Structure formats: structure tokens, C-alpha cells
Image (cartoon, grey):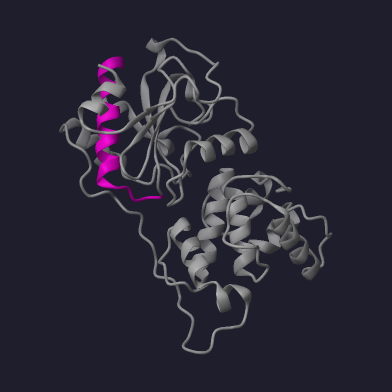
Amino acid sequence: MTIKSVLQNAGITVNDRRSIAMGGGTKRAKSRVTHIARHHSGVNVDQSMSILEGYWKNTHGWNTGGYHVVIHFDGSVDWNYDYDVTSNGVGNHNSYIFNISVLGNGKFTAAQEKSFAIVAKEVQRELGIPTKNVWGHNDFSGHKTNSCPGIDMNTVRKALDDNKFVVTPVVNPVKTPVKAPAKTPTKTPAKATGNAIIKGIQETVGVTKDGWDGPNTRKGVVKLFQRFFGANDDGFVGNETLNKSKPIRKNDRGLHVYALQAMLYLKGFTVVGKPDQVAGKNTVQGIKDFQKANGLGVDGIAGSKTYAKLLKL
């Protein structure tokens, strides 16, 4: 059996990308793989492989992607790399890991959990990996503060040992946002015309979708930004966040760009349409307008000084 065949036998769609996935040139012996790592994407968006690979290549500068397998909301699976390929899921540990990502942010569909269980059990069978070695991203040394994989791995391991899958996913608690008082909304571009866009932002960052720009919404955007750069996702911009962040320039792509666009929108420096993960001319203009309004050097590049003011709650 293979990952593809066991999934197909269960009626699950498999996109075999092993011949077209980016990179894959770093090899290891199949026998070296001793652990399975579970990840989540950190956002409630069913991202395509083209978006994920663009993020890995253009933002991280990786030659090979982050995950051997990616599981979408409907349970369909992208199979990217064979066992002998070293992917980039967990820094300093990838030489012995098979990386699986379940798209989402702390909550996952039953279809996803079923596909994860099938893939994990097949990898365990083929490589002789015990369930005790099925870890979450933050189980690995040096990654303890990471919120990934967004689920209690003891629950996951118990389900695997019982030859089941997680029926009721563990959901990270989300505090109810502070709603605006009952009065005429402030006439900023975000609140006057942007309820639908704000709801989209709220869905992406994983807070209650009420369409209002409350403190939990902004904190969720900051957390998204922090997760992208590998900082502690506490929602507050400190030295760690600023030191790990990288400048955003025109034509940059990725979730960090989305977070930047979302915060610009929420603060009234709107971009055309909804945040789209691409730093185009309108985003650059929004950065310039924000920099000018806050007495910063106006260059259209979001660096640490711009971040410090823009992401401050």
C-alpha cells in the first residue's frame, strides 16, 4: 500500500504532486525517518499549493516546501514529497521528520481528521513509527512557544492508538470581541463601508465574525503576523516580534502581507478591495500614507519602525 492507495480506497481525493512540487533535492535515507510532525497553517483559509509554495519560496527563500502532505478542509490531500525528501516543517529537526499540515487555525473538520489519521497510520506502518513519536510542531525542542499544531496531541495520539480519528476537534478558545457601543459608527473607511471585509479578516484570524473593528480583531491580526515570522503569538508587538520581522516591499506575497493590509484597513488606510496577500501599488500607497500620517520616513516599505506603530493596539 501507499499513501495514495490507502486514501483512494477510503474514497478520499489525492493530488499526487511528487513530480511537480517545488525542490525536493535534499535527500535522506527512508530509514532515518523516526517521527511524524503535525502542523496547522495558522489561518482559517483553505490555501492552495500555489499560495503555500509562493510563501515558502518568496518569503522564506526555501528551495523545498514545508510539508510532505497538506490536508484541505474537505479532507482532500496534496501529496508533495516521498519519504526520502527532507522538507522544511520544523527548523533544526527536519532530517528525521515526515511533516503533515492540516490547514486551519485551531479547529479542523471531521474530513481533515479522517485523512490525517489515514495518512499518519500508513506512514507509521511503512516506517515502523510508534504513536508516541507522532508529535505536534511545538513538541520539538526550540519550538515550545509555537501555537502550531493548534490541537492537543494527546487526543490525536489516543485516536491513532484506538484506530480512530478525532471526532470532536479541540478548538482553541476565542474570547468574545469587545463590541462597539450602540452609537453611530465612526466614519472611517473600515467601519463605514467595510463590515463584510472586516468579517473576512475576522474569519481569517480566528475571532468572532461580528463585522466590527474591536480590540480582539486587531490582536488576532497581530498574532497572524507573529506566527508568520515565528515570534511568540501573544498579540503584542515587542522586541522579539520586531527583531524577527522582515521589511515588506512592493510585490512581496504571503500571510505577513495579508496581516499588514488588514491592519492598514482597520486603521483607515484602505487598500482597494479586501486583503489579498500581494503587496501591490495600493498597499504600498497605504504604507506611505500611514508613514506620512505618523511622522515616519515615507518610502512605502514596512520596516520595524512602521511595524511598531502600525501593529500597536
- Image position, residue 193 (x, y; %): 56, 75
How many badges with numbers are in the image?
A: 0
Residue 122, image x and y in percent? 26, 23
Residue 283 position by quadrant? bottom right
Quarter of image, res 23: top right
Q: Is residue 59 above or below residue 185?
A: above
> Would residue 170 appear left or right of 300 to someone viewing this image?
left
Q: Specify the quadrant that holds the N terminus.
A: top left
- Residue 312 seen in the current view: no
Q: Residue at x 59, y 83 (%)?
A: 186
Q: Residue at x 73, y 60 (%)?
A: 287
Point out the stretch of residues depicted in magenta: 105-127
Residue 14 appears in view: yes
Q: Relative to the observer, which residue lies in front, 164 or 238?
A: 164
Out of 251 and 216, give the one closest to the viewer: 251
Residue 310: image x %, image y %?
67, 63
Q: Position of residue 33 (x, y in %)?
A: 39, 17
User: Relative to 245, is 23 above or below?
Assistant: above
When the figure is inspected, residue 120 is found, relative to residue 41, above or below; the finding is above
